[in-house]
Image: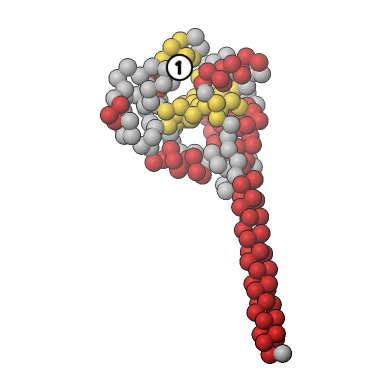
């Protein structure tokens, strides 16, 4: 009798432990699934793809000019380009392009070819020669977000790390064409003061 009692006790402990383990595993899987679903990304496309898409459905283009060695670029990737509000707004209203400002890609923009003839493959992971497109847009620091209108004209090179609410102002200003009514620095200052951000910072 004692033998059976001991066996049943061990079996009870085994099944109880298994139930706990199953609950832990299920909880872990659920947390992982929720994180996977909530982790959203901007729909980055190539510069050529953005121009083709623009022909079919006109939208402005947002280009993230970055470099592989740039710490602030990685910071902006993490705090801004992973922000849900930014992701949703950009995916809905823009064509987004990530462009290595010191890379060696050959691209065509507005019918004109651009390359990086002074690119040094030995310095692929550190500072390199600026790409011709980088010079064309007048980019001198990284990160810089370049906004392009529906006619492939540059609106502004927005220099430096921008938090979600800081980028929000420009995203909405250009999307709504409010920039067309801003003719001076004073007018922009008034626009800036009146702007009410809606994006969260996380």
189 above or below 24?
above
Q: Give the color scheme: rainbow, by chain, secondary structure or one colour.
A: secondary structure
Q: Residues within 10 Å of mark 1 (few under 14, many from 20)?
A: some
As drawn, which residue projects farthest toward the right? 1
Residue drawn at 67 percent across, 64 percent down: 23
198 sits left or right of 124 in the view: right
Residue 105 placed where, x, y %? 41, 21
Q: Is residue 202 visible?
A: yes
Q: Is residue 168 visible?
A: no
Residue 68 placed where, x, y %? 38, 34
- Total labels: the figure holds 1
78 above or below 177?
below
Residue 127 placed where, x, y %? 31, 32
Residue drawn at 45 percent across, 43 percent down: 75
Image quarter in which the N terminus is found: bottom right
- Residue 49 versus residue 94: which sits nearer the camera? 49
Kindly indicate the quadrant of the structure image that contains residue 83: top right
- Residue 85 versus residue 182: which sits nearer the camera? 85
Element type at mark 1: strand
As drawn, which residue projects farthest toward the bottom? 2
194 sits left or right of 100 in the view: right
Residue drawn at 65 percent across, 68 percent down: 18
What residue is shown with label 1?
107
Residue drawn at 52 percent across, 23 percent down: 46
Residue 139 placed where, x, y %? 40, 25
Kindly indicate the quadrant of the structure image that contains residue 121: top left
139 sits left or right of 121 in the view: right
């Amino acid at each position: 009798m004692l033998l059976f009692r001991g066996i049943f006790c061990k079996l009870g402990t085994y099944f109880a432990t298994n139930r706990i383990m199953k609950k832990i595993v299920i909880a872990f899987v659920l947390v992982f699934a929720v994180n996977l679903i909530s982790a959203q990304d901007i729909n980055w496309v190539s510069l050529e793809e953005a121009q083709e898409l623009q022909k079919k459905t006109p939208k402005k283009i947002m280009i993230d000019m970055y470099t592989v060695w740039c710490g602030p670029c990685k910071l902006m990737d993490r705090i801004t380009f992973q922000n849900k509000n930014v992701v949703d707004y950009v995916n809905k209203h823009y064509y987004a392009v990530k462009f290595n400002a010191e890379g060696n890609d050959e691209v065509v923009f507005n019918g004109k070819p651009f390359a990086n003839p002074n690119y040094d493959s030995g310095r692929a992971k550190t500072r390199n020669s600026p790409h011709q497109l980088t010079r064309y847009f007048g980019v001198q620091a990284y990160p810089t977000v370049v906004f392009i209108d529906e006619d492939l004209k540059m609106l502004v090179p927005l220099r430096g790390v921008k938090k979600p609410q800081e980028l929000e102002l420009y995203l909405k200003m250009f999307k709504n064409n409010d920039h067309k009514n801003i003719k001076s620095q004073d007018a922009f200052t008034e626009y800036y003061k009146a702007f009410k951000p809606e994006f969260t910072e996380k």
